[in-house]
Amino acid sequence: MKTPHRILAFLWLLVTPMAMVQAEEHNHAGDIRVDNPWSRPTPPGTPVGVGYLTLHNTGDQTVTLTGADSPRAGHVSIHQTVMQNGVMRMQPLAEGLALASGATQVFKPHGHHLMLEQLNKPLLEGEQVPVTLQFGDGSTRVLQLQVRSLDAPEPMDHSGTEH
């Protein structure tokens, strides 16, 4: 008679972690969909890399991206590229980036991007770089930046199209 109890205990051990993952995803970060996370390779000795992606706020409240981190970088910051007096400059968004309900923000070259600073080793073509996005409500979202070759085209965002 102990066998059914063992089977139930085994099934409980399988189901409990899945339920915990689903519970963790049901927060404000759960209202953020991330598409096309990618980066470019860096030459040896280069201390910075970049992260690009598309964020979609599918929730009914504004969500603020306040920061990010990665085990591959000593510091990750949110940047935007702006034109000042005819010169393109990158500047950090110290207050983060607010994403209104229903809004989409594309992080791309010459626009918003993540700066991976103090890299502990070069980013290599074909690898996946873990990044954790942090939001104003304390929630997080883990993603993997796909390091694409320098001559690869930028990924297209097809999220607004029907298939």
Image (spheres, grey):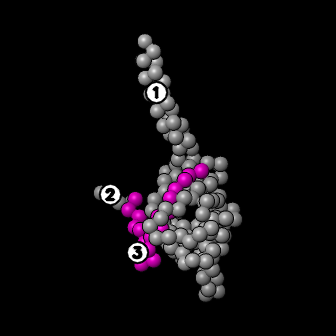
Range drawn in magenta: 140-159
Callout 3 secondary element: loop
Task: Tell me if 47 is positioned left or right of 52 in this view.
Answer: right
Q: Give above or below for 30 relative to 9.
A: below
Q: Residue at x 46, y 27 (%)?
A: 10
Is residue 22 in view?
yes
Task: Say which amino acid is labelled 2.
Answer: Glu
Task: Say which amino acid is labelled 1.
Answer: Phe
> Going by the picture, which residue comes out furthest to the left?
163
Task: Say which amino acid is labelled 3.
Answer: Ala
Q: Residue at x 49, y 30 (%)?
A: 13
Dot 3 crowding, Cα within 10 Å, few <14, some 14–19, many 20+: few
Residue 105 drawn at (x, y percent)? 52, 63
In terms of image quadrants, where is residue 156?
bottom left
Q: Nearer the viewer, residue 156 or 123?
A: 123
Q: Nearer the viewer, mark 3 or mark 1?
A: 1
Secondary structure mostly seen in magenta is loop
Q: Nearer the viewer, residue 9 or 99?
A: 9
Residue marked by disc 3: 152
**Disc 3 to disc 1, C-alpha distance:** 46 Å
**Disc 3 to disc 2, C-alpha distance:** 25 Å
Q: Determine contact: label 3, label 2, CB under 8 Å.
A: no
Residue 159 drawn at (x, y percent)? 40, 59
- Residue 162: assigned label: 2
Q: Determine contact: label 2, label 1, CB under 8 Å.
A: no
Residue 44 drawn at (x, y percent)? 57, 77
Q: Give above or below for 27 relative to 44.
A: above
Task: Tell me if 121 is positioned left or right of 144 in this view.
Answer: right
Callout 2 secondary element: loop
